[in-house]
Amino acid sequence: MSAIYRLQCKAQSYDWGKFGDVSKVAAYAKASGATVDDKKPYSELWMGTHPNAPSIVMDESKTPLSELIKNNADLSTKAVYDQYEGDLPFLFKILSIRKALSIQAHPDKTLGARLFKEFPEHYKDPNHKPEMALALTPFEALCGFRPLNEIAQHLETYPELKELLGNDVSEEFFATVKATGESTSEKNVAHNKQVLKKVFGTLMRSSQETVTHLLSKLIARLNEIKASDPISKLVIRLDQQYPGGDVGVFSCLMLNYIIMEPGQAIFLGANEPHAYLAGDCVECMATSDSVVRAGLTPKFKDVDVLVNMLTYQYGSAESKKMTPIKFGEHSLLYDPPIDEFSVVWTKLGADEAEKQKPIEGPSILIVTSGSGKLTGEALKTESDYELKEGYVYFVGANTPIVAQSGSSELQFYRAFSVATNH
């Protein structure tokens, strides 16, 4: 029995995606045999067993990946198989983003289960959804609350935000920042978070009429002074993408604006506010579709749940970036503080090779650029598999692999899961 299978993966087409001729998702979907329409947005490529877009083994029988894993416990190891009930615990994706996604957070397991039980029409499953994004191209995102003094500075620079919050809330925030904004004592940090929650809650619950009025006032002022700093330009851009007074535009003055280069990554834990804004990334998440939205979206907004669920941790944009560790001569490991997944990024120059040690769990890899070959050992026999841009493979547990680049650079990302007792 083989331990390596090439997969056919499905692309998702949402309004915010990049169009076919420039979308990485479209380019990779072509490798799976999809016909691409240049005028259509291609937003996400899903690699995994999620029922909304399940991956299929590219063989005569067209076996669904979920079935392959379910019927062959050895491909996962018994420990992983038992822990995740014969399924894959992660969903691996490529995203190509033309316009901002909603400001959102993902519930933890307890809240996820409650929302699913009480509002199944809005929340489709009870799982939590921690996720990690690794930049494929320069990538922009909002992630977590800014340091408090930066938010206070924005209340001064953008008086329309201060007006929206009202004098009492603004003054209480200024006083708090002045008194305990820099403090690291547990008591003060807890108090700071309460005040930050009040500020964010006031913003998100503002009346639509007031938001529309103050946002148009802000945009008019920024255009008049020809504001060219990154934050003002972002405010103008988000307002153009979601016209008509979306409160999410104001949120970017409170959340960290992060620009990542290829090789940089962010991890988004449960109950952390975020929004992807532009670029292409590799994303990995726990298998779930549980999202609480509150801005930059025409979809259902659940403002009270969002305001109450957030952790209100605050800190610098840099503190949100992950520090990878060496995994091989040409590979880096991104290992978030959760059980379901980790990701390895391998970058080989022309005519280079790397042997990767066997991983004690199932993995999925996608070639993001270049070409070459993969040699996998299974049952003492070796087989070669072609590596080309957009090719996706499932690799069974404990399979040693060797990746060899061709005459140009080869890059691939590999998501995997191991049992938690490791």
Image (spheres, rainbow, N blue to C red):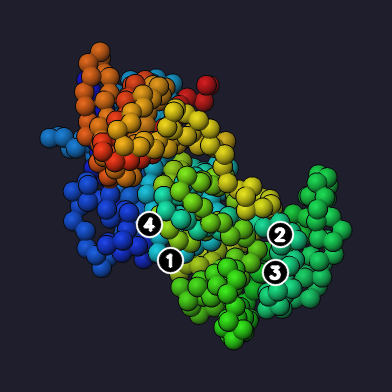
The residue closer to the viewer here, 69 or 401, is: 401
- What is the C-alpha distance between the residues marked 3 and 2? 17 Å
Mark 4 Cα within 10 Å, few/some/many (few <14, many 20+)? Answer: many
Ranked by sequence position, the earlier of labels 2 and 4 is 4
> How far is disc 1 from disc 4 in space, using C-alphas?
9 Å
- For numbered disc 2, what is the local secondary structure? helix
The image position of residue 68, as x and y in percent, is 26, 30
Q: Closer to us: mark 1 or mark 2?
A: 1
The residue singled out by tag 4 in the image is: 96
Residue 206, x across and y down, in percent? 64, 74
Name the kind of residue labelled 4 in the image: Ser
Residue 197 tag number: 2
Q: CA distance from mark 2 to mark 4?
A: 32 Å
> Which residue lies at the image location 56% right of the left edge and 56% below the top edge?
258
Where is residue 308? Give x, y as percent.
65, 56
Q: Secondary structure at mark 3?
A: helix
Q: Quadrant of the N terminus?
A: top left
Query: Marks 3 and 4, how far apart in space?
Result: 30 Å
Q: Where on the picture, by quarter, is residue 298?
A: bottom left
**Label drawn at residue 99:** 1
- Disc number lying in front (3 or 2): 3
Distance (Cα) linking label 1 and label 2: 27 Å
Label 3 is placed on what type of residue? Answer: His
Q: Residue at x 43, y 66 (%)?
A: 99
